[in-house]
Image: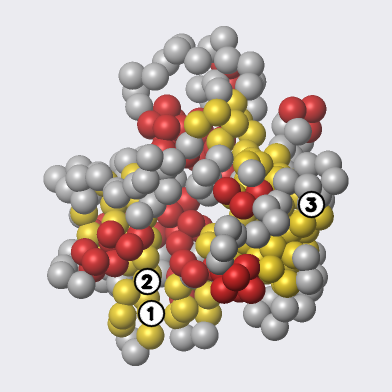
């Protein structure tokens, strides 16, 4: 089975899913980031809890996957990882000054190889922005650790709070670990003279308040600058593309009109 994180979220959280996937041998997630907690929770409902859920990563410009967790390594690759490069491909992680970062440090992934597009059709400006000395700039931030890649988030989606960079995907993964939160998204909104994280959540407001979410979140071991200083907003559903990607532009448009229910 290959599908997107929102489907695995439903599998993990739905009490209706019991033995439906007991005969599953393999499962792969892609198209959007998946946190390690969700990966583990979904895995427990696949193949009686012994079939690993693997992740893969790629873009349209890489004609599909360029990293993947190999089947034979699925039981030892850490949850949250998108695996290693496919054969004959290369990658480097660079900082804002286009210098290679050390292993374990976040950086933008640059790739090259036979699966990477040679350029955008009749769009030299886009080509000049996307390619440097044969390397394609993916726009994704990742960490390379112990031989495997971990996607942090899209570079343009990072929230800049007083000089600190906050990855929405990391905060979303924490929110989704709450047993009463069915879905979540995070964006940066203006506040404190900078950008602050605001959470959008799907839950039963009669059972869980915005204040309770903010207080619970602040106790999950993250750095204080990652707290939900922009508050919490309740939605009936998180806007997403057919591929499962969160439509953050829709949330930013919504943020211009709203007042959060609670702040830190």
The residue closer to the viewer here, 114 or 119, is: 119
Q: How many marks?
A: 3
User: Pointers 3 and 2 in contact (CB under 8 A)?
Assistant: no
Closer to the eye: label 1 or 3: 3
Closer to the eye: label 3 or 2: 3
* Label 3 crowd (10 A; few <14 / some 14-19 / many >=20): some
Q: Locate residue 37, reporting x and y percent.
A: 53, 43
Residue topped by disc 1: 195
The residue closer to the viewer here, 194 or 243, is: 243
- Disc 2, SS: strand
Image position of 151 with respect to 83: above or below: below
How far apart are the alpha carbons under marks 3 and 2? 34 Å
User: Pointers 2 and 1 in contact (CB under 8 A)?
Assistant: yes
Q: Locate residue 133, reporting x and y percent.
A: 78, 71
Q: Which mark is residue 188?
A: 2
Residue topped by disc 3: 113
Residue at 39% in and 19% down = 17
């Amino acid at each position: 089975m290959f599908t997107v994180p929102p489907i695995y979220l439903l599998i993990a959280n739905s009490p209706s899913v019991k033995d439906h996937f007991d005969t599953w041998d393999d499962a792969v997630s892609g198209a959007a980031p998946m946190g390690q907690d969700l990966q583990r929770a979904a895995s427990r409902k696949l193949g009686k809890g012994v079939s690993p859920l693997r992740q893969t990563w790629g873009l349209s410009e890489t004609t599909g996957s360029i990293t993947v967790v190999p089947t034979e390594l699925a039981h030892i690759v850490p949850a949250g990882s998108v695996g290693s490069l496919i054969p004959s491909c290369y990658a480097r992680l660079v900082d804002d000054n286009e210098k290679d970062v050390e292993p374990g440090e976040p950086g933008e992934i640059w790739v090259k190889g036979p699966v990477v597009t040679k350029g955008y059709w009749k769009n030299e400006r886009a080509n000049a922005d996307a390619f440097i000395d044969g390397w394609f700039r993916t726009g994704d931030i990742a960490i390379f650790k112990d031989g495997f890649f971990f996607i942090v988030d899209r570079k343009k989606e990072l929230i800049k709070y007083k000089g600190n960079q906050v990855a929405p995907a990391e905060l979303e993964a924490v929110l989704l670990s709450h047993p009463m939160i069915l879905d979540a998204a995070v964006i940066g909104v203006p506040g404190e003279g900078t950008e602050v994280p605001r959470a959008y959540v799907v839950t039963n407001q009669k059972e869980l308040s915005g204040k309770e979410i903010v207080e619970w979140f602040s106790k999950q071991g993250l750095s204080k600058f990652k707290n939900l200083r922009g508050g919490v907003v309740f939605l009936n559903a998180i806007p997403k593309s057919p591929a499962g990607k969160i439509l953050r532009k829709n949330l930013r448009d919504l943020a211009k009109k709203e007042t959060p229910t609670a702040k830190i």
